[in-house]
Each structure stands twice: as C-alpha cells, then as structure tokens.
Image (cartoon, rainbow, N blue to C red):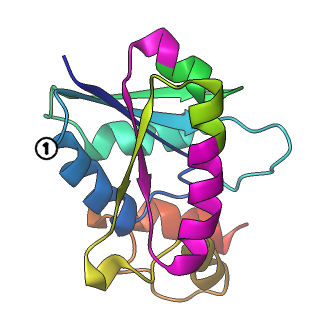
C-alpha cells in the first residue's frame, strides 16, 4: 500500500491546502494529513480545531486520515508506515526551504521520498499567513479558505 503523509500547521487550512490534499490523495492509496503541534509557535487555532477543520473537509474520503503529531516528521511517517512525504511548493522561495527539509529528511530516513506538488495557479498566492492577516483586519476571506469553514475561521480571526 502506498501511504503518503502531508504535514503542516494548517493555521488555518486554505484552499491551497485543499487543492494539494485532493491531488495527493490521487497519488497514494492512503493519505495521512499530519497536523503539527509545535511548542515554539503560538497558532491562532488550537490543534483540536485544526484537526477538526481538516477532518470536516476530508469527510467522505475513506483514503484520507487526519492526525496530530509533534516531534520529527520522519518518526511520525515511520510509525504510520508512510513512504512518501507530500509537500506543496508555491514559489521558488518555498522550494529553497522545502529542498533543504527534503535533504535533511532523506538523511534521517533514506527510505522516505519527498514529493513536491504545485498548487493550481489560482491558489499559488494563498498562504495561511495571508489568510490570518486579511481576516484579522476584517477583510473578506472568501476564495481563500473552504466555504464550509469560512464563517468560523473569519469569526476567530476578527477576535484574535
């Protein structure tokens, strides 16, 4: 079974994330969306909220599983039997960081392959940071986040 893992903080989940989730799910038999719990960051959305958001948007797709993790991604991938790490690359600046991470992960776990996916053009400028900034300033986040989550995300960002 080809198992892939798509890690991220997803603070909040964006349409770019959704795009990559759906395309990655077509490449593997089982996709694990791994939500990072990072003690050095202060996310706007709790770990539980982020897992719940991703579970909601992937509901009905039995090949997708959402879980939380902390520590090294390669250890989480090994524990879950993943063979592929899925990463999104929007621009060259993303690629430079992701390339370094892929080489580090390969050194730590040579059995894992990193697969880079590019988002659709319309999602290439969307990032969680931009969504947070627009939402915190009261801007309309339509077209940036999944419609089913838009009101909840917007309400939280207005009050952050």
Is the residue 58 above or below the residue 30 in the image? below
User: Going 81% across and 49% down the picture, which residue do you hit?
Assistant: 41
Q: Point out the residue furthest to the right here.
A: 40
Q: Is residue 62 left or right of residue 112?
A: left
Q: Position of residue 66 (x, y in %)?
A: 39, 30
For the N terminus, the quadrant is top left
User: Going 60% across and 45% down the picture, which residue do you hit?
Assistant: 103
Q: What element carries label 1?
A: loop
User: Going 31% across and 41% down the picture, which residue do you hit?
Assistant: 56
The picture quadrant where one finds residue 40 is top right
Which segment is the magenta one?
A: 78-103
Q: Which residue has dot 1 on it?
A: 26
Q: Which of 38 and 73 is in front in this view?
A: 73
Is the residue 98 above or below the residue 49 in the image? below
Q: Position of residue 8 (x, y in %)?
A: 54, 47
Number of numbered labels in the structure image: 1
Residue 128 visible? The answer is no
Whether the magenta-drawn stretch holds residue 118 is answered as: no
Residue 125 visible? The answer is yes
User: Going 38% across and 43% down the picture, which residue do you hit?
Assistant: 54
Whether the magenta-drawn stretch holds residue 93 is answered as: yes
Q: Where is residue 52 in the image (x, y as percent from the top left)?
A: 43, 37
Is the residue 51 above or below the residue 17 in the image? above
Q: Is residue 115 left or right of residue 46?
A: left
Q: In this view, does 120 lie to the left or right of 107?
A: left
For the C terminus, the quadrant is bottom right
Label 1 environment density (alpha carbons within 10 Å; few <14, some 14–19, many ≥20): few
Q: Is residue 125 left or right of residue 41?
A: left
The picture quadrant where one finds residue 60 is top left
The picture quadrant where one finds residue 109 is top right
Q: Position of residue 158 (x, y in %)?
A: 64, 74
């Amino acid at each position: 079974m080809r198992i892939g893992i798509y890690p991220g903080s997803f603070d909040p989940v964006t349409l770019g994330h959704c795009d990559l989730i759906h395309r990655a799910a077509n490449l593997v038999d089982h996709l694990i969306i791994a939500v990072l719990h990072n003690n050095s960051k202060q996310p706007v959305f709790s770990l539980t909220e982020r897992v719940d958001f991703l579970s909601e948007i992937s509901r009905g797709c039995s090949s997708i599983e959402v879980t939380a993790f902390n520590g090294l991604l390669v250890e989480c991938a090994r524990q879950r039997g993943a063979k592929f790490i899925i990463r999104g690359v929007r621009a060259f600046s993303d690629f430079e960081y992701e390339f370094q991470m892929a080489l580090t992960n390969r050194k730590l776990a040579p059995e894992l392959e990193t697969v880079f996916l590019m988002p659709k053009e319309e999602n290439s400028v969307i990032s969680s940071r931009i969504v947070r900034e627009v939402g915190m300033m009261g801007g309309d986040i339509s077209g940036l986040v999944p419609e089913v989550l838009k009101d909840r995300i917007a309400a939280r960002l207005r009050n952050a």
